[in-house]
Amino acid sequence: MVNKSNIFFKTDKISVTFVSLRFKNMALKQVKKISNNYNWKSSLTIYLLLILFISACSSVKLKTFEYPKPVDTSSRVIDYQDKKTYSINDVVFADNQFDGARLNDFTQLNDSTFQATILPENEPINPSPHYAFRIWSKQSQTVYLKLNYPTSTHRYIPKLSANGEKWKPIDSVAYQLIDSAKNALLKIKIDSKKLWIAAQELKTSKEAANWAKQIANHKDVRFKIIGKSKLKRNMIALDIYEGNPEGRDIIVVLSRQHPPEVSGYLAMQSFVEELLKDNRLQKDFRNNYRILVFPLLNPDGVDLGHWRHNAGGIDLNRDWAYYKQEEVKTIVNSIVEKANESKSKVILGLDFHSTQEDLYYSFSDEMHSSIYPFKDYWIGAIDNAIPNYTPDDQPFPLSQPISKGWFYKQFNAESLTYEIGDETPRDFIKLKAEVAAREMMKLLILRN
Ligand SMILES: [Zn+2]
């Protein structure tokens, strides 16, 4: 099973605690000596000061880290899109006047073809061109709509909705790639009712807050606003445990550093919901561990319809050594504070993302976290539990200042980037996240 000697003797915090214990013994002797000579008030004051000193010694401090190739995460300028309704001859309209929208221009190419132009918040940037807008017409008609990316390449299969809440991928016969797969052409029916078209289901900061508050109806969940983003949107957190969290190991769940990565966000939601079921396994787990959930790390980027960056024009997942961006700074301070508050060790950090395929970015084998080799058991257990699915484990060494590296360097914690494919069927995302949560709980309970 999991190697206990690695679990218990590898962290900085434990060695600090041993040092503190030595100080404590010395301090107690000193207090005894003093109390023989002075009145009880002065010895009480000295004792309290010593206690304060000891607790300061045993706390974890946020560190900054060096990487071979440093990344400059100082803020850069972003372009804001014009929020407006585009009108073509007062018959066909398109707009981007809602949170999460992205539409940079809307024009007519010929009688039956319209063009939606999509641009990023700034450059250079990853090719993840998010789009979201509404289109309608005074006359019912079937039209062609070109998704035009002057600086990038089409990535996301369009999702359609009548209300911005229930979404369906476009019928494959009504959608094709054009211009050597750079752009896309859609065939759609439009009428006076607004048709929503987006790269992924629309999940704004409002949706994340509503979800988190609803989750917090469970007695073991505390909903907290832990700070503000660069543009003063709320940074939200869920703190999950039953009873007294003192001394318990912590698991951290992160999501949505990158705005269009909705499939990863959906996995995070199902994962957390599974932890909150009221079966024996889940209750035992919540009785033995503390779970910190940060459902939306980049609320500004999400509401501004960004492709990847925050309002500081930075990829947040390159700032986990420097903390120059408000969002990363808020999250790392919150994690360190919670760990100190309950005198806990952070043992596992899971960061939910999306990419082309489902996979797990894990540590390469020479990296031994405090719960090594948890990852191999976990991925093996997920493999066993889901028929006809083989998890794709992609270990790699630490080379960039990403969250995964931070968990390892700051806490010697295990960490994985849990990646979901852009177009992975939504029911499979849910199934896999539930299995992953259950198998994690089983393994960690065995360890305790
Ligand atoms: Zn990502």
Image (spheres, grey):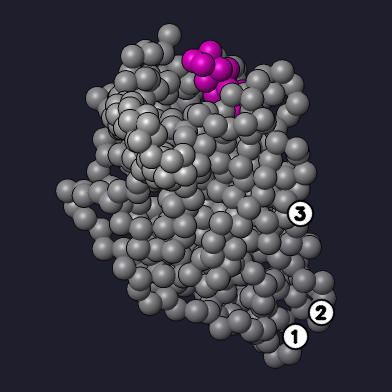
Crowding at mark 1 (Cα within 10 Å: few <14, some 14-19, many 20+)? few
Q: Is residue 243 left or right of residue 252?
A: right
The tag on residue 418 is: none
Say what amino acid the circle numbered 3 marks: Lys
Q: Which residue is mark 3?
A: 166
Residue 283 falls within the magenta-colored stretch:
no
Name the residue at the left extreme.
Answer: 68
Dominant SS type (magenta): helix
Q: Within 8 Å of ligand 1, the CB of disc 2?
A: no
Determine the residue positioned at 67% across, 83% down: 85
Residue at numbered disc 1: 91
Q: Is residue 437 visible?
A: yes
Q: Is residue 263 above or below residue 191?
A: above
Which quadrant is home to the N terminus?
A: top left
Classify 373 as above or below 252.
above
Say which residue appears at 43% left-offset and 32% top-offset: 345
Q: Nearer the viewer, residue 282 or 206?
A: 282
For mark 2, what is the residue?
Answer: 139
Precedes in sequence: disc 3 or disc 1 = 1
Callouts 2 and 1 close, C-beta under 8 Å = yes
Label 1 within 8 A of ligand 1 by Cβ: no
Callout in the foreground (3, 1): 3
Q: Which residues are magenta?
A: 434-448
Q: Using the image as rendered, state which of residue 112 and residue 396 is in the foreground.
A: 396
Helix, strand or loop at disc 1?
loop
Mark 3 falls on what kind of element?
loop
Q: CA distance from mark 2 to mark 1?
A: 7 Å
